[in-house]
Amino acid sequence: MKRVLVLAATTGYQTRSFGDAAARLGVELLFATDRCHVIDDPWQDGAVPIRFYDEAGSVATILDRTRTRPVDGILVVGDRPTVIAARVAEALGLPGHPPAAAAAAGHKRLTRERLRDAGLKVPDFTAPRFPCVVKPVALTGSRGVIRADDPASLAAAIERVRAILTSVDVRNERNASHQEILIEEFIPGHEFAVEGVLHHGRLYVLAIFDKPDALDGPFFEETIYVTPPPLDAAARQAIEAAVAGAAHAIGLDHGPIHAECRVATDGVYVLEVAARPIGGLCARAVRFTGGETLEEMLLRHAVGESPARWRREEAARGVMMIPIPRRGVLRGVDGVDQARRIDGVEDVQITAKLDQVLIPLPEGASYLGFIFAGAPGAGDVTRALRDAHRALRVAIDPELPMLTSSALQYNHHHG
Ligand code: ADP
């Protein structure tokens, strides 16, 4: 039986989906998840406990385990374990992305340098003019990405990003790259995301997602992804060629990639190529002709299958990452059933927890939930997603005033 190592932050939707696909394919999974290894197997799930911030230690722990449970392939869920996965693949002699390429892919300045050195289109990041974009070099999900149009808004944006980078959760990642901020030229244009698999250096595009909502700032929350995009063959080829060129310039070689690009009047700018597949629940927006999930196909790739003959299903499909409308305490979401009944809507998942403090971008790092839709045409999918979103009524209360020291005392004893 083939065995595949899956690195993930914790177990969640995508790891379960990999589990289902593995059961169907007769592949065994070995998980490595980010946690403290004071107790050996706290979740009793046989996962290898690693710490994402400790790359060398995590690699050693995994290699130790694979001596008795050898693996045939490696997959990652999420951005943080990509370098660890690459180092394990290299140590085991398995095909994968080279560690230096995975590191560059996860670092926005290094990505810019690789693309510029390869002669590809990049936003000017050495002497940017206004409008510009301020961003942390190693956060994800548009966190801390802010447009500035003049010196005053630039100064404010830098201050705001600095505050994010010194917050407890970012500092807990213990990533030295979180001390760096990148400022680059703002590229006007329509945005697309590309889901693909590199197979020994060659890019196979699985889906191009249109982002029908304008992304002009000052913050850049992802909302709708819909595929297929309204592009002719030449435009599609231009995007695919730009992403293939960028992946190659970064040095990525074998495994899933997820890229973001903007099509400007002078061509395609690849903003990033992540060394991992599309995240979490959004993966449900990619289906293949036999009804297979993305996770199933990625497992097949991990054990050696070429993606050359894979085809995405005929129908259009899309997902809306439901943005957090404002800061506050989530009290409830009404209209979910009504949204689910809208033509084309396949599912509505509210993933934020009741009574949780919701934090919108640019500081926040999560969504309210996800809406999924499928229809014969992409326009119907987008309409269904927008209608479903409009049907939702989100109750958010203002946050409590700052806790006083006596309130903290109370929490300390009772919380
Ligand atoms: P992340 O990895 O956090 O998603 P990105 O660098 O990809 O960060 O930026 C997130 C989003 O911000 C992009 O998808 C895009 O909409 C917008 N953005 C980032 N940089 C630029 C830029 N130079 N010009 C225009 N839009 C940008």
Image (cartoon, grey):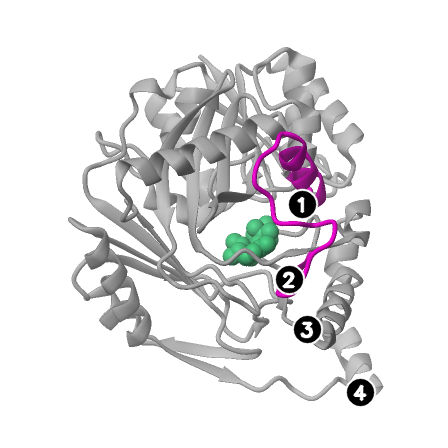
Which label lies toward us, 3 or 1?
3
Distance, label 3 to label 1, CA atoms, is 22 Å
Depth check, front residue: 26 or 312: 312
Ligand 1 near label 1 (Cβ, under 8 Å)?
A: yes
Give the amino acid type for the residue marked by disc 4 in the picture. Answer: Thr
Distance, label 3 to label 4, CA atoms, is 38 Å
Q: Are marks 3 and 4 in contact (CB under 8 Å)?
A: no
Q: Is residue 52 magenta?
A: no
Ligand 1 near label 2 (Cβ, under 8 Å)?
A: yes
Label located before the other in sequence (3 or 2)? 2
User: Helix, strand, or loop for circle 1?
Assistant: helix
Dot 4: few (<14), some (14–19), or many (≥20) neighbours within 10 Å?
few
Marker disc for residue 404: 4
Per the rendered image, the range of residues in magenta is: 106-135
User: Helix, strand, or loop for circle 4?
Assistant: loop
Marker disc for residue 132: 2
Give the amino acid type for the residue marked by disc 3 in the picture. Answer: Asp
Residue 86 percent location from the top left of the image: 65, 25
User: Helix, strand, or loop for circle 3?
Assistant: loop
